[in-house]
Amino acid sequence: MSDELCFLSAVELRRRISRKEVSPSEVTRAVLARAQRLQPELNCFITVCADEALAQATDSEHRIMAGEPLRLLEGIPFTVKDIVNTKDVRTTFGAIPYKDNVPDHDAVAVARLRAAGAILIGKTTTPEFGTKCLTDSPLFGRTRNAWSREHSSGGSSGGAAVAVASGIAPLAVATDGGGSTRIPAACNGVVGLKQSNGVIPHSQVADAFGNQTYVTPTTRTVADTALMMQVMAGEDASDPWSIGVPARDFVAEASPVGDLSGKRILFCLAPPGRKVSADVAAAFSASLTTLEALGAELEEMPGDDFDVEPIWRAINHTAWRTRFEKLAAEHRDELSDTFLKQLALAQRISGVDYQHAMFDRTMLFRRVQALLERADFLVMPTILRTALPIKQDLFGTIEIDGEVFDHVRPNWFPWTMPFNMTGHPAVSMPCGFGTDGLPIGLQLVGQFRGDAELLRACAVFERAQNSLDRWPDTVLPSSIM
């Protein structure tokens, strides 16, 4: 029974808790036991909050037995990436200099989840300050893919995606600054949403006005993502982009009602000159066939002007240098070579270079807006090959179907970074498996602030795919295999 609870969606757990078929304490004990069993293999947690979680579960049960109204996430476990502040629970940012850092407040998104009755069970792994697409750090080591111990979880929200994919908790708070939610979602076969800028307030970001980073949901199902969005979304004074954003009923609006008739989709396999693995190309083609069968009208679009890694690097690395240069000088021996190399790259970027990148960011936004004036959604692969080897180096080469390329970022995930900069919502959805047995992700992009409409399209696609019953064999108990 314990493992069976771990394989239920948040929507189903909510139904059973509301009917008193299962208690918050039973659910919490089940996921904590599973975390304890799988952590030595997967290494997806930095901190597990067992005592605190059990105390919260007891409080939740008291509310239920006292007949108080059921909160939206009453008794449902969730995790938080260890780059997002959690009151009285250490938040290390994946970095040794912050290994004992304990915030005195929750990030806005976390506070809202707690207020809705969700139970925090732990902080998930992240590379130092979420600065790369692989989840490893001198503080905790490497996080392994839920489907293969020999492959990376992706990053930087690798721990969040692995915890969800392996059935440890149905809901995870992640972050996304260039694909950090969607890359590990694709690598581990889960749903990873980067919402429109401002839909979920980002109360920690240093540059709120130039923001391209997001606090995001990661789940196994679109319905669970909608449930998280219902709680996390809404304006807050800390985030200027959130002010005035209309409230949406994500749970109702994201339900898989009907098909995609009347919807127009522009698609592209890859930017010009980028190699795509045969497995990803085949899964992408099959996904397009599914979307067309659902009634969508498809049209291929050119991939020109989407290879924007240099623009992203100029903006992002400059922000990192501003934030971390002093820390690196004082704690050089405690930080990874990869992190220090990325800071060094920023020294080549002038103020003029940065402003040119911001101009280019505006042009990119207008290009995407122009495409979405004649289409409802854009579709492309999330990543151009399945998960990389567990010992992959960010500054090493990347191999795709026997060809070797010098740079990981532009050759593995050229499609994620553009929509951090434009602010449009983008979701990675599971869409198949490679011959290596690893998941493949499909990215769908929606209208600016059209998050609910995008989630509905994803829910319709998810229903047609019918792949939710498949779990990684490596994490299944014998009674379920």
Image (tube, rainbow, N blue to C red):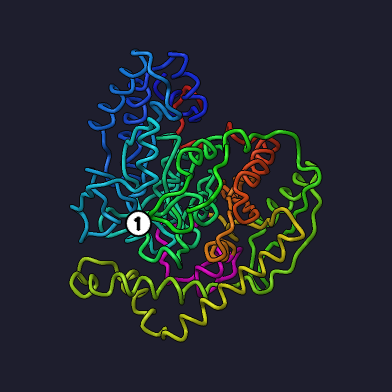
Question: 292 left or right of 316?
Answer: right
> Where on the picture, by quarter, is residue 360?
bottom right
| Element assignment for label 1 | loop
Can the viewer see residue 152?
Answer: no
Question: 481 left or right of 270?
Answer: left
List the residue tagged with mark 1. 204
The residue at 26%/47% (across/down) is 105
Q: Residue 97: percent from the left, percent from the top? A: 20, 61
Q: Is residue 76 above or below residue 171?
A: above
What segment carries the magenta color? 387-414
Q: Residue 188: percent from the left, percent from the top? A: 50, 46
Q: Residue 392: percent from the left, percent from the top? A: 43, 63
The residue at 40%/32% (across/down) is 116
Question: 374 left or right of 458?
Answer: right
- Give the overall secondary structure of the magenta segment: loop
Q: Is residue 183 above or below residue 418?
A: above
Number of numbered labels in the structure image: 1
Nearer-the-camera pick, 267 or 231: 231
Label 1: how many residues lie within 10 Å, few (<14), some (14-19) or many (20+)? Answer: some
Is 404 within the magenta? yes
> Where on the picture, by quarter, is residue 463?
top right
The residue at 48%/81% (across/down) is 355
Nearer-the-camera pick, 420 or 8: 420
Can the viewer see residue 428?
Answer: yes
Q: Is residue 125 above or below residue 319?
A: above
Q: Residue 1: percent from the left, percent from the top? A: 42, 18
What's the amino acid at mark 1? Answer: Gln
Q: Residue furthest front?
A: 244
Is 371 within the magenta? no
